[in-house]
Image (tube, helix red, strand yellow):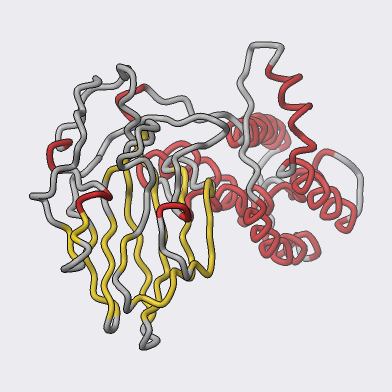
Amino acid sequence: MKNKYLFNYIFLLGLFLLMLNDHVLKAAYGNWFTGKLSDVAGLLILPMFLKYLFPISTKKSVLFTIVFFIFWKSPLSQFFIDSFNSVGFYNMGRVVDYTDFIAFLILPLSIYVLDNIEKFEIKLPTINFQKMATQSLFLLTTFAFFATSQDVDLAPEDYLTGCCITEPVQLNIGSGSIYVPTMFTPDGNGINDVFQVSADSNILKIDTFTIFNQFTGDILFEETEMTEITPENGFDGIVADTVAATQYLYYLVVTSVDNVTMRVNGSICSLPCEEPLNVPRPDRIDDCAFPIQYDIVNGIYDENIDSQEDLNCF
């Protein structure tokens, strides 16, 4: 019976991971991993769900999954999303990020399960129980897929949670050193407008500089092989033609002239203070470190350097 495509250990595990990640882990530990986990779990179970819905082969269910995921993760789906959202009863969303295609690596497991479904099947005791349980699982799975495509809806006070609670990054990498601030202010006044890494002359390059959405894990900015470590190569805070008061996650790979490579990750707060902000004042804002507070001569962060910021915009 087709119930086996839903009632098997792998499908239930994938569904559990999908719902746990979307409703718990993303909010608590929003990062690159949680951003990809929903894609992996969804691609694992979608071919099984399709086999339950339609009398199609494993090959066709996987092929449809691949085509749909490529469409969904491309700009081609924007018209569909806009049309759906215009109805007004549900807000569907997604961010175009082609690194999400790494989730295709889970499909061989899905194919193996479908080709050996009896090995993973969970036997249900009675016909009536099978019908009730299958209907419930069908509705739960449908809800899980829709919830994955929902826009994150956060209260303003959530945007800057955790701002500047950690010290700025000051690291020796081989013979070189870097400084990473904890706050920048993309308000267009020419001071601290860009999130940049400061480095001395013994840093050869920034191999990778990536900015993530803290709640979804989506990549918002990425530069690679940066040998010119200047503000022009930094993150200007503009996402979808706007700047926002929020917190981003970053990931760096840095190499020194003596070929020592180090990976660094952390969070950076964006606070455009040109106009009053509809967010509470962060508790630790007086402890924030800004790009301009880098002592070029000594190659270190100096809190005594005037940040030139007046952050009374809350």
Q: Is residue 79 found left or right of 281 in the rendered image?
A: right
Quarter of the image containing the C terminus? top left
Residue occupying image coordinates x 45% and y 31%: 243
Most extreme residue toward the bottom is: 258
> Residue 271: x, y in percent?
32, 33
Total residue callouts: 0
Residue occupying image coordinates x 45% and y 48%: 235
> Residue 36: x, y in percent?
55, 52
Q: Is residue 231 found left or right of 308 in the rendered image?
A: right
Most extreme residue toward the top is: 88
Q: Is residue 146 found left or right of 290 in the rendered image?
A: right
Q: Nearer the viewer, residue 282 or 23?
A: 282
Indicate the quadrant where residue 59 lies. Answer: bottom right
Q: Is residue 80 visible?
A: yes
Q: Nearer the viewer, residue 53 or 260?
A: 260
Residue occupying image coordinates x 31% and y 19%: 277
